[in-house]
Amino acid sequence: GLPQVRCAAAMDIADTLSDPLTLLRRFTMTKQPVKLVGDYLVFGRVRFPRAAPTAYRASTKGKPFYPVDALWFLLQKQSLKPGEYLRECTSNQMMPVSRPDQRALLAYLNGTADSSPAIDMTGATIVTAEPVPADEGATSAAAPMELDEPDDLEDAQAREEAAAAVAKAAAEKEREEAAGKAALAALLAGPHAQVAVEADGGADAADGDGGGDGGAEAAGPDGKKKKSKNMMGAAKAYIKADRAATAAILKREKTLRDRRAILCAPGVSSFQSVTHILEAFKAQQKALEREEQKARRDRSAAKPPPQPSSSSASSRPRAGSSSSKAAPPASAPPAGKAPKPVATIVVPAAITSAVNLWNVSQLLREKRWISPVELKQSGAAKPAEIKLEHCFEDGSRARFLVIENANKLSEAEWRNVACVIVQGAAWQFKGWPFKSEADLFTKVLGVHMRTRDETPNQLVKSWNVEKYAFSKEKVNQHDVAVTVSSFWQAVHKSMTVQKPHLLMKPHQLS
């Protein structure tokens, strides 16, 4: 009938995806014949080369993988004595299975054991089954075995019983998957969906015990929790149905590119599709925040002023009294907002530094690195300071002032120093209000940037600072972009912990 047809189709797909060891075990357990035809072992409608390696390792020196014909031949000759078995292997040019491996291997192939330590699926070579050609199908089906099989493999009644058992198991599995699919649909539909999952006998498959208490319990919170749990158990059959096929497909997949390879592609310096999505999301967030602020202002303006009580009205001072003159009018504007906090970044003053006031603007704003020496030689003017604003991944923002001379900072201004980019010389910190470099970098984030062709600074290695190296070649500007992104992540993490007053949350932005 139809279940048998579906079963046969499913078996064909599973056979194509199976490895030789798994397929040989399944055919052995279900007593289906496996035939050696020429240079191939034929499993129903698919075949493997007889020398195809399996995932079963030998215990001998080097631990090679047994070929599939060696395992098949052991099944045919398992009743022979050791000496007779070795002579048969020699005469038929088969690799013999070592005697220490035979018992565990036969137990696994016959289904007595579920697994074996000698099975190495990850290290085995992937061998794909191929369909038996149509012109060879009839010939191979009618061709005699090159080797004598045991009588039980030739017994027609045994084969029919095995086929019936396989069909019954497939039909039962199909019913379980259908029930699991319905249970999963009920879970995905939401907590208010009432989907009955019927099993044999009209019982609710979602109720694990099949009793009538499940429906009553579903009315309360505990009942809902129990019903959801039982339905998840019923859904697992559908979720796990294609696990073996999926694992076989994934094992055959080869990763041609990953996100790192794409990001490192030469000539790619911008990702407009990604930036457009990000900018659209930011604009949407700003619009929502503006609407929330407007709604809050409207609600506060709509509130009527509190009415004074009779006692307070009688005790209210007269219009000519001094108290009345001193009180501010009711319509006086609110006090002005506090000034926005500004974080400070200190950079080295030396032109030999990889980052300084000459090129920090291009680096942090445009994620481009230009040599400070080249900028100076081109006639560019060195700015006295740089002002910039950065938006972090969580939507918070911060305004930054980049300077090179920190000796004139007051104590209050030092509390706003978020980062110090170091060159690698201790004299950079001369006159700063810190006992040592260790004291400085426990209170302020330290960062050291260099190009990859520079020799790492030995003094910087002993400091608790973030260390970054990037390529100065123009074709590798993506390397600079990755470094700048890592720099902003480190700044955000440090400010969140040590300088939270310098961060402006989305609701604080005007």
Image (cartoon, helix red, strand yellow):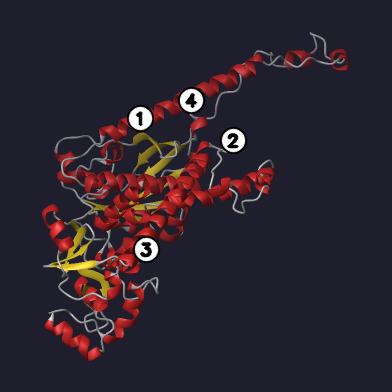
Residue 502, position as x, y percentages in the image = 48, 39
Circle 2 packing at 10 Å, graded few (<14), some (14-19), many (20+), is few
Of callouts 3 and 1, the N-terminal one: 3
Of callouts 4 and 3, the N-terminal one: 3
The residue located at (17%, 84%) in the rendering is 88
User: Rounded to the nearest whole Å, what is the CA distance between mark 2 and mark 1?
Assistant: 38 Å
User: Closer to the observer: label 2 or label 1?
Assistant: 2
Q: Give the camera-side residue of 328 and 30.
A: 30
User: Rounded to the nearest whole Å, what is the CA distance between mark 4 and mark 2?
Assistant: 31 Å
Of callouts 4 and 2, the N-terminal one: 2
User: Closer to the observer: label 3 or label 1?
Assistant: 3
Q: Secondary structure at mark 2?
A: loop
User: Rounded to the nearest whole Å, what is the CA distance between mark 4 and mark 3?
Assistant: 68 Å
User: Closer to the observer: label 4 or label 2?
Assistant: 2
User: Closer to the observer: label 4 or label 3?
Assistant: 3
**Image mark for residue 161:** 3
Q: Give the camera-side residue of 395 and 457.
A: 395
Residue type, label 3: Glu
Circle 3 packing at 10 Å, graded few (<14), some (14-19), many (20+), is few
Residue 281 in sight here: yes
Residue type, label 2: His
Q: For mark 2, what is the residue?
A: 192
Residue type, label 4: Leu
Q: For mark 1, what is the residue?
A: 279
